[in-house]
Image (cartoon, coloured by chain):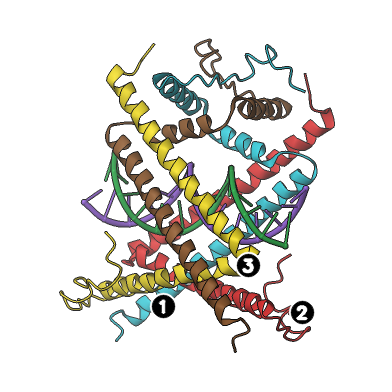
Chain colours: A yellow, B brown, C cyan, D red, E purple, F green
Amino acid sequence: MDAIGDSAAKQLKSFIERIERLEEEKAALGDDLKAVYAEAKAFGFDTKIMRQVVKLRKLDGRDRDEQAALLDLYCAAIGFDYTPLGRSARGLGKGDE
Amino acid sequence: MDAIGDSAAKQLKSFIERIERLEEEKAALGDDLKAVYAEAKAFGFDTKIMRQVVKLRKLDGRDRDEQAALLDLYCAAIGFDYTPLGRSARGLGKGDE
Amino acid sequence: MDAIGDSAAKQLKSFIERIERLEEEKAALGDDLKAVYAEAKAFGFDTKIMRQVVKLRKLDGRDRDEQAALLDLYCAAIGFDYTPLGRSARGLGKGDE
Amino acid sequence: MDAIGDSAAKQLKSFIERIERLEEEKAALGDDLKAVYAEAKAFGFDTKIMRQVVKLRKLDGRDRDEQAALLDLYCAAIGFDYTPLGRSARGLGKGDE
DNA sequence: CTGCCATTTTACCGGC
DNA sequence: GCCGGTAAAATGGCAG
């Protein structure tokens, strides 16, 4: 009753397994995180505030990026093409892929 | 204005850094996951269904049954005939409206 | 620096305001929805299942069947026996309370 | 076959219907929104940028709120109880429930 | 155990 | 018409 080819079934199985493996690792990291917070709490730190701090630091970067994107958008909108090299060629930001 | 001791501050900093490192790794796993789904999609698989499969496998049988039973109950209660026909009752007519 | 005409600016402003008004109303409806679910919960109903019911009713029969068939197919392909037992096979095993 | 009481079934049905009605209205608003954007586009405006503008204006308010919340948190953390009346007793914000 | 918050998932919209 | 990204919804998890 394999309305799906045998090799396709194999592939699917392989994908599912890879996914489950990755999710497992991800969950493990989640546990580690929890453990660190627990330890910090044991040292008397307020975890809620710590979470806010982490969040804030993360958002700071993103906000900067959003602003830049918005600026790009507006500049494009009014037909102002600023420095072909420059913003586009910046290697200074967060060289993420 | 350090309402917090110096060594405590050090500790806090260390905790924050450990947390940020872990979250970074976690995010990387998340990207990997995304990539696997993308690859599966490129092979013609329906990722939405794949996600359902993964989710189902995470749930154990008992929970699955309970949820299904409750859903049936509610549908019956409001007079909604949704025929959950899984692999069982498929093909037996029911020209729906 | 108005790369945009005056009347165009007026128009744009008007559009933005209409949009914001509509989004406001939409958000209000969202709050109402939330309130209804909360009330239902207070009456002992399982809101998660309720959401499923609403979703199912939104989908028409054909789509429902297609999705179910695909899910069955995938589960079979990877050798996962999840027994979707809807209202059909109930009562034959686990005397649920 | 009503493993659920008759009156409970009635209630459930009523809740579901209220929900579906509200979602209908919400969807209608969504259509209106779409229409406004379409009209604006017909006038030559770039809808993507318009969306960004709307988003920006919305986020501005939220950021303000987040900042305030964070401030509260930090003040609480260092045991600084600022004005018993004041921030707490403000009836001026968004009188949400 | 309840309410919040983070993550995940789904639906939408614009682009190609 | 499909695909990709982006915003809303929903689910699950955590702290209180």
Look at 53% across and 19% down and name the residue there: B86
Q: Image check: D10 left or right of D32?
A: right
Res. B72 image quadrant? top right
Res. C13 image quadrant? bottom left
Question: In the rendered view of the protein, which quadrant contains the C terminus of chain C?
Answer: top right
* Residue at numbered disc 1: C10
Which tag is nearer the camera, tag 2 or tag 1? 2
Image spot of residue E5 (x, y percent): 59, 61
Q: Nearer the viewer, residue D69 or D77?
A: D77
Q: Image check: B58 left or right of D83?
A: left
Could you tell me how far apart the alpha carbons at marks 2 and 1 are, in whole angstroms?
Answer: 39 Å
Q: Around disc 1, counting alpha carbons within 10 Å, would you say few (fewer than 14), some (14 to 19), or many (20 or more)? A: few
Label drawn at residue A37: none
Chain at tag 3: A
Look at 43% across and 61% down and name the residue there: B21
Chain at tag 1: C
**Discs 2 and 1 share one subunit:** no
Tag 2–tag 1 contact (CB < 8 Å): no
Label drawn at residue D89: 2
Tag 1–tag 3 contact (CB < 8 Å): no
Label drawn at residue A43: 3
Could you tell me how far apart the alpha carbons at marks 2 and 3 are, in whole angstroms?
Answer: 34 Å
Q: Nearer the viewer, residue C14 or B58?
A: B58
The residue lying furthest to the front in this view is: B7
Chain at tag 2: D
Q: From the viewer's perspective, is residue B36 above or below residue A74? A: above
Name the residue type under label 3.
Phe
Which tag is nearer the camera, tag 1 or tag 3? 3
Image spot of residue B51 (x, y percent): 45, 36
Name the residue type under label 1.
Lys
Local SS, label 3: loop
**Discs 2 and 3 share one subunit:** no
